[in-house]
Image (cartoon, helix red, strand yellow):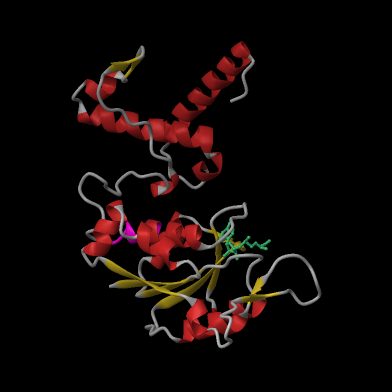
Amino acid sequence: MLNFHVITLFPDLIDSYCRTSIIGRGHAQNCFTVRTVNPRAFCQDNYKRVDDKPYGGGYGMVLKPEPFFLAYESLTLTTNSAVILLTPQGKVFNQSLANELVALSDIVLISGHYEGFDERISSICSHEVSVGDFVLTGGELPALILIDSIARLLPGVLGKSESLINESFHQNLLEGPQYTRPPVYKGLAVPDVLMSGDHKKIEKWRRFEAIKKTYLNRPDLLAKANLSKQELKDLEEVKRSLAEQNDNNGRQI
Ligand SMILES: C[S@@+](CC[C@H](N)C(=O)[O-])C[C@H]1O[C@@H](n2cnc3c(N)ncnc32)[C@H](O)[C@@H]1O
């Protein structure tokens, strides 16, 4: 059983998301647990202050070490655990880290707020993780991003209709385009091959469309994808035809 422990000043944000939709269903079915711990409960002064002015001067308030250390020390963890500080200064989160973390029994997620943490808090962490190169007001959304992406990998969380097969980042490719009814909408038609009933042809089309989309949106991934000689040749053809189109309509692709 995987247990998430979220150290946060705003537990309601975590609780409400974890009660909703697919993650809510997995949570209710005990596929994993999510517990929140509020560092404010561990403040030892009468005012329950979790932050203070930065040493050396500067703007904003910094989260004090004591309430966060005490909140962490209150947890019961197995040795198969990770303690993750959510910070824009961390390594950027991705699917392969989610795939790694899902094998653990306990994941502690420490969410900051205000100007961020006293640096000493990082000494209790095994990882520093960012959700992207931008700054949010708090670590609750990042904590939920990790919980969501990790929990959905656990058995029983996704139903048959929300499968992990052929998803983006599987085999370093993005998922190709998907269509549903109607067959034509506002003059935009579903590709014939998808309605052909020929499963081999559909599979081949899907794989190549995934390669094309990855080339267009995330060429950095493509270098690590395992493409066959024929696929590489077909991709060269696509690149040539896109470059031609580009020349013809002066558009940047
Ligand atoms: C306003 S931010 C602090 C930013 C910090 N002063 C800096 O410049 O690095 C407050 C908190 O939000 C969370 N946060 C903000 N952006 C994040 C990101 N991209 N990834 C993970 N956590 C983030 C962190 O927990 C952080 O301590």
Image position of 159 with respect to 99: above or below: above
Q: Which of 202 and 6 is in front in this view?
A: 6
Where's residue 206, x and y in %? 33, 32
What residue is rendered at 22% in x and 22% in y?
195
What residue is rendered at 59% in x and 58% in y?
137
Q: Does the magenta stretch include residue 151?
A: yes
What residue is rendered at 63% in x and 72% in y?
117
What residue is rendered at 44% in x and 55% in y?
95
Q: Residue furthest right?
A: 56
Image position of 224 with respect to 232: above or below: below
Q: Does the magenta stretch include residue 189?
A: no
Q: Residue furthest front?
A: 46
Image position of 129 with respect to 203: above or below: below
Q: Nearer the viewer, residue 77 or 251?
A: 77
Where's residue 233, x and y in %? 46, 29
Of the 4 image quadrants, the one containing the N terminus is bottom left
Q: Which of 14 and 100 is in front in this view?
A: 14
Q: Is residue 165 left or right of residue 149?
A: left
Image position of 157 with respect to 109: above or below: above
Number of disc labels: 0
Where's residue 149, x and y in %? 39, 56
Of the 4 image quadrants, the one containing the C terminus is top right
Where's residue 170, x and y in %? 38, 48
Stretch of the chain drawn in magenta: 149-154
Ligand 1's quadrant is bottom right
Quadrant of residue 175 within the rendered picture: top left
